[in-house]
Amino acid sequence: MATSASADLSKAVKQMYLDLPQGEKVQVTYVWIDGSGEHVRCKTRTLDNEPKTIEDIPEWNFDGSSTDQAEGSNSDMFLEPVAIFRDPFLRDPNKLVMCEVLKYNHKVAETNLRNTCQRIMNMVANEHPWFGMEQEYTILGTDGHPFGWPSNGFPGPQGPYYCGVGADKAYGRDIVEAHYRACLYAGVKIAGTNAEVMPAQWEFQVGPCEGIDMGDHLWIARFILHRVCEDFGVIVSFDPKPITGNWNGAGCHTNFSTQAMREDGGLKVIEDAIEKLSKRHEYHICIYDPKGGKDNARRLTGFHETSSIHEFSAGVANRGASIRIPRNVGQDQKGYFEDRRPSANCDPYPVTEALVRTCLLNETGDRPAEYKN
């Protein structure tokens, strides 16, 4: 495959135009999840004034037949703004807006998993559920080959790359640092970043976020990463097992706590929640990747710092378990736990919703009633 044309365009020339004054007009970029449940789309419009709140941004529409969300004969769908961020690409006063998708009749689209998540989070608002998600990803060249890897072979075995420093260990740090700063500018609750075990694989963390904010902030962080990679002429992959063989996969470990877990004696509340999770393993596996467990089956093998997809396990400081209780949480007898099962390409809305349903609403059952294989 030829090098992406965007990699050859001069960003300095582009900047000359972005430096032009824009008057009082404001550019607002609407972002939404398409029919795949994994990818984001965007489009931009002009507003007369800078929006101060989400209520200042009008509803918009798009062609759902081109995003696998509607039939061509009735393709108009609506974008309902739900969360507003500063735009790190066009800069102030311009905005990025996370949107829910509604059908032609303004009913919730089947692919809109945020709406139900919001309803569930409202039910447990007094519990103050906090989440933090650790988003692993892989940088690829436009030919689909991992960035920095030899064109006709493999780098040295895993070991020196995790949190590594040096041109022979860290592949693509420019992208990572650009993304980090862009998220801070946007107002995303990014908490940190590090190089991962497989070369060209990295991680960033978002949180703590309360309730629905977790999904909003992670999706916008992913959008920003796609845009940063676009500017650098490379691709970001959230595939949970981008390279077969003796290489680590990519997950989206999800940290979860409630106010009761964070207070003195909270470890008992954490242990009770883990007991509930142990009885609902298949339900969570169905939800923790967009393909109902098929993507995670390639990753959750029991090797490469993963648990087996077929068995539930939990332990203190055990990165080979389904649920890990951090060492300091065991010592402090309060804090949070980490669910290591969600895949890198998971949708954070149903993931966080599932944790609340099982741990706080005490729901039971092996498979989601709405799950369709």
Image (tube, helix red, strand yellow):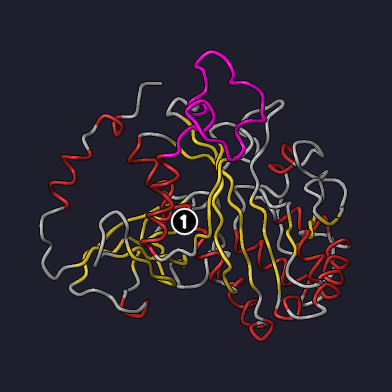
Q: How many marks?
A: 1
Mark 1 = which residue? 221
Q: Position of residue 266 (x, y in %)?
A: 80, 76
Q: Position of residue 357 (x, y in %)?
A: 74, 72
Q: Residue at x 28, y 58 (%)?
A: 44
Whether 25 is among the magenta residues is no
Q: Residue at x 44, y 50 (%)?
A: 67
Give the left or right position of residue 359, taking residue 212 as reference: right
Is residue 159 covered in magenta?
A: yes
Residue drawn at (47%, 56%), measured in percent from left and top?
221
Q: In terms of secondary structure, where does tag 1 sit?
A: helix
Any part of residue 122 in sight: yes
Q: Left of 59 or right of it: where is 237?
A: right
Could you tell me residue 92's position as x and y percent? Answer: 25, 65
**Outermost residue, bottom side:** 126
Residue 82, compared with residue 242, is above or below; it is: below
Q: Nearer the viewer, residue 30 or 176?
A: 176
Of all residues, the one furthest to the top in this rendering is 152
Residue 26 x/y as whole percent:
21, 67
The region drawn magenta spans 145-173
Label 1 is placed on what type of residue? Ala
12 relative to 3, above or below: below
Which residue is nearer to you in this view: 323 or 242?
Answer: 323
Q: Quadrant of the N terminus?
A: top left
What residue sits 23% from the left and 74% below the top? 50
- Residue 36 in view, yes or no: no
Q: Nearer the viewer, residue 96 or 364?
A: 96
Q: What main secondary structure does the magenta stretch of the protein show?
A: loop
The picture quadrant where one finds residue 6 is top left
In the image, is 213 to the left or to the right of 80? right
